[in-house]
Image (cartoon, coloured by chain):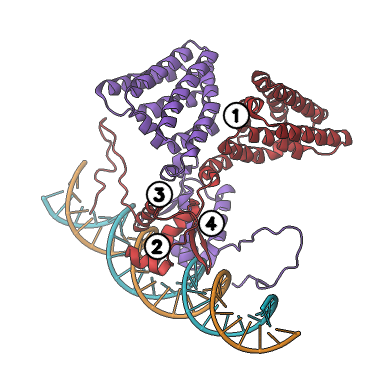
Chain colours: A red, B purple, C cyan, D orange
Amino acid sequence: MRNSPGQQQRLPPEPEFHAVRKGRRYEQVAEQIQRLIASGALSPGDRLPPERELAAKFGVGRSSLRDAIRTLEVMGIVESRHGSGTVVRDLSTDSLVVPLASVLAHKRELVAELLDVRRMIEPALAARAAANATEEELSRLEDILQRQAEKVRRGEPSIEEDSEFHYTIALAARNSVVLRVLDVLMDLLRESRARSLQVSGRPERSFAGHQRILRAIKRRDGPAAEAAVRKHLKEIEEVVTRQL
Amino acid sequence: MRNSPGQQQRLPPEPEFHAVRKGRRYEQVAEQIQRLIASGALSPGDRLPPERELAAKFGVGRSSLRDAIRTLEVMGIVESRHGSGTVVRDLSTDSLVVPLASVLAHKRELVAELLDVRRMIEPALAARAAANATEEELSRLEDILQRQAEKVRRGEPSIEEDSEFHYTIALAARNSVVLRVLDVLMDLLRESRARSLQVSGRPERSFAGHQRILRAIKRRDGPAAEAAVRKHLKEIEEVVTRQL
DNA sequence: CGCCCTCAAGTGGTCAGATGACCTGATCAT
DNA sequence: ATGATCAGGTCATCTGACCACTTGAGGGCG
């Protein structure tokens, strides 16, 4: 049963070898359940049979079945409710974006890189908004800027308006995945954003940047919207970089 | 160990209530372990104490401890090795990815959105690569294309080269966050990409697209690199959309 | 009749113990 | 030096028991 020959040996340059990992029983169970869901035999909202019954059906112990359920639960595929049962979850965007969100969450310390991601994504979002935004969305952007102007005038923090402005632009881009990614990004960068808005004159310039962006979007001018966002983000980056 | 006072009490009607999920014991354990890792008390490569010992330390049963470990394992934070122990994983490796490609297969409209994210990110990556790529990276890109050409000529699947090409461009962009995001994206889109490469003539056109991109990068021509990537992705999108 | 309370049945959460499977390092034989 | 064997340690799985929560039915009361 010893299947690790020559682990200590230097292998000659040859086709690379891959570590062999024997599957665990619960992983197989989890896969089977996933297949049942993928095949349509189980749908979102469906309740799985009780643990004890399911364990018997799969021919495994309840521990292994629970491990499988746990695995699927972390993956967002099912949800266990104490006393009630385990249901298949709606495969919404959130379930799919969990891996993206967790990737970003573990990189919170890399502010510069996160800003860089914004620089890649947000100009495209602004261009999309310039093409797609409804009148309602434009009104909403205007409302947000009015609120921001009020707060700036009164010297109050305006980070919520900042978030909302960018978020509304992303909404107009009609991509729920990016919306979610941006949500996480903004949250991760919350501290540095709040700090940068405390720099003297920064709230005013933030507001001015938002105005430029909105004007371009209202003109339906995609490239100008992109350029305005780039300029806006560049200013943010400069402030944040100076603060690091 | 009973730390749930007044669980059965009715709370008076007040501002909106959010569903309250009483934490499960194992979730608390998992969080504690995560905190130990985040604080630096545990580092990648460190081995956790044996399950039985750890369970005793946390004052829980071994099942609960195992559930916590299972949770962390699915999240890619630790890895349990049968007979050997549980180690903290290196957070900079692929371990953060939870593959959900099979789930994606069930949710076709998200493919378009994920492709859309690629369309936002990858032109920027190509422009970065045009500015930053080292000679070694350029060589590597060329090697990849040679391998792809070979495979296309022999009629073999070339999805690995496709991935590697895009990944290497992202590497040259010097942003580890985006690298990981792209990794997740490519993985999530793996099935649709594999299928699109099965369309007659598609491998050849994919290769041609990669050539155009590489030529622009070698010329250090950012805008041309962007345009080439856009065209390439647009072709992919058309094929994939037709297949849905 | 409608509302509220109680209770029983069902179901997940946790604990404990036992056995099997795997891993690692040391020792011995060739 | 290499391969085989063994002992001790650790995870994987099974089983059984008990606790905690949920749900629905039935009964009592206004």
Q: Earlier in the sequence, mark 1 or mark 2?
A: 2
Q: Which of marks 3 and 1 is nearer the N terminus?
A: 3
Question: What amino acid does circle 2 point to?
Answer: Leu
What label sits on residue A176 in the rendered view? none
Q: Is mark 4 on a helix, strand or loop?
A: helix
Q: Which tag is nearer the camera, tag 4 or tag 1?
A: 1
Given this view, does label 3 or label 1 mark the residue nearer the observer? 3
Is B173 displayed left or right of A129 in the figure? Answer: left
Q: Which of C27 and B43 is in front in this view?
A: B43
Q: Mark 2 points at which residue?
A: A65
Q: Chain ID for label 3?
A: A
Tags 4 and 2 both on a single chain:
no
The amino acid type found where label 3 is placed reads Ala
Question: Marks 4 and 2, how far apart in space?
Answer: 20 Å
Q: Mark 1 points at which residue?
A: A121
Q: Badge 1: how crowded within 10 Å, few (<14), some, or many (20+)?
A: many
Circle 4/circle 2 CB separation < 8 Å: no
To which residue does mark 3 refer? A38
